[in-house]
Image (cartoon, rainbow, N blue to C red):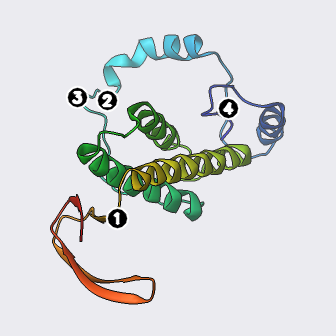
């Protein structure tokens, strides 16, 4: 394919490849045109074209495979971290809402349709990893601010079920239980 999905148009390499493909016997004939020329050419046969009303959603695209599993894994970790931070923010007056919004924007930007499945250019993946590193630093800073506002111990259970765990502190072990979606003391 010679069409770019990055809104920059075909590159010189793509055009050279197209020139070569046009000379290969047996391949379909390619007609180059502008978008206006293409849609004008459809006017004569528009009654024969399929029509679609409503949402353009392809039911078989459930889930997304990727060629960059590390990116997808980091994306999911960020989603979970944001869910946890929002739960903490709901119980803590010291959460920086502007930073939380910035963190969401970083994650959502990197969920662009070419990033998660792995069809972008290499620099996009480097940039996404840099964004995830920036996210991790901001998340750690917010968690440390939260921990600094607490005196003593604090238990956070972001899960939607009660859990009981053995906690270790300074070589001592104790059993702690926390109800679902809570922030509190053991």
Secondary structure type for disc 3:
loop
* For marks 3 and 4 on the same chain, the one whose residue lies earlier in the sequence: 4
62 up-or-down from 156: above or below: above
Q: Secondary structure at mark 2?
A: loop
**Residue 171 percent location from the top left of the image:** 44, 89
In the image, is residue 72 above or below residue 25? below
Residue 153 left/right relative to 133: left
Question: Which residue sits at x=23%, y=26%?
Answer: 53
Sequence-earlier tag: 4 or 2: 4
Of the residues tagged 2 and 1, which is closer to the observer? 1
Q: Which comes before the other along the chain, label 1 or label 4?
A: 4
Location of residue 186 in the rendering, given as x and y in whole percent from the top left corner:
24, 71
**In front: mark 1 or mark 3?**
1
Q: Which residue is mark 3?
A: 54
Tag 2 residue = 50
Residue 180 is situated, as x and y percent measured from the top left of the image, at 16, 65
Could you say which disc has been placed on residue 152 in the image?
1
**Secondary structure type for disc 1:** loop
Q: Is residue 75 visible?
A: yes
Real-space Cα distance between discs 3 and 2? Answer: 14 Å
Between the residue at mark 1 and the residue at mark 3, the CA separation in whole angstroms equals 55 Å
* Callouts 2 and 1 close, C-beta under 8 Å: no
Give the farthest residue toward the front: 151
Mark 2–mark 1 Cα distance, whole angstroms, equals 66 Å
Checking the image for residue 30, the label placed there is 4
């Amino acid at each position: 394919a010679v069409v770019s999905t990055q809104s920059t148009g075909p590159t010189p390499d793509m055009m050279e490849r197209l020139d070569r493909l046009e000379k290969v016997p047996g391949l379909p004939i390619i007609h180059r045109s502008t978008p206006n020329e293409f849609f004008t050419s459809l006017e004569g046969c528009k009654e024969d074209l399929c029509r679609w009303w409503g949402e353009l959603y392809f039911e078989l695209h459930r889930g997304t495979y990727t060629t960059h599993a590390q990116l997808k894994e980091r994306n999911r970790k960020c989603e979970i971290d944001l869910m946890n931070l929002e739960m903490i923010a709901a119980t803590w007056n010291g959460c920086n809402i502007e930073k939380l919004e910035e963190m969401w924007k970083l994650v959502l930007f990197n969920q662009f349709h070419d990033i998660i499945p792995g069809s972008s250019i290499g620099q996009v993946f480097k940039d996404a990893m840099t964004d995830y590193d920036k996210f991790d630093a901001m998340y750690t800073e917010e968690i440390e601010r939260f921990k600094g506002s607490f005196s003593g111990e604090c238990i956070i259970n972001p899960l939607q079920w009660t859990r009981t765990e053995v906690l270790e502190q300074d070589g001592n072990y104790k059993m702690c239980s926390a109800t679902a979606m809570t922030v509190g003391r053991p």
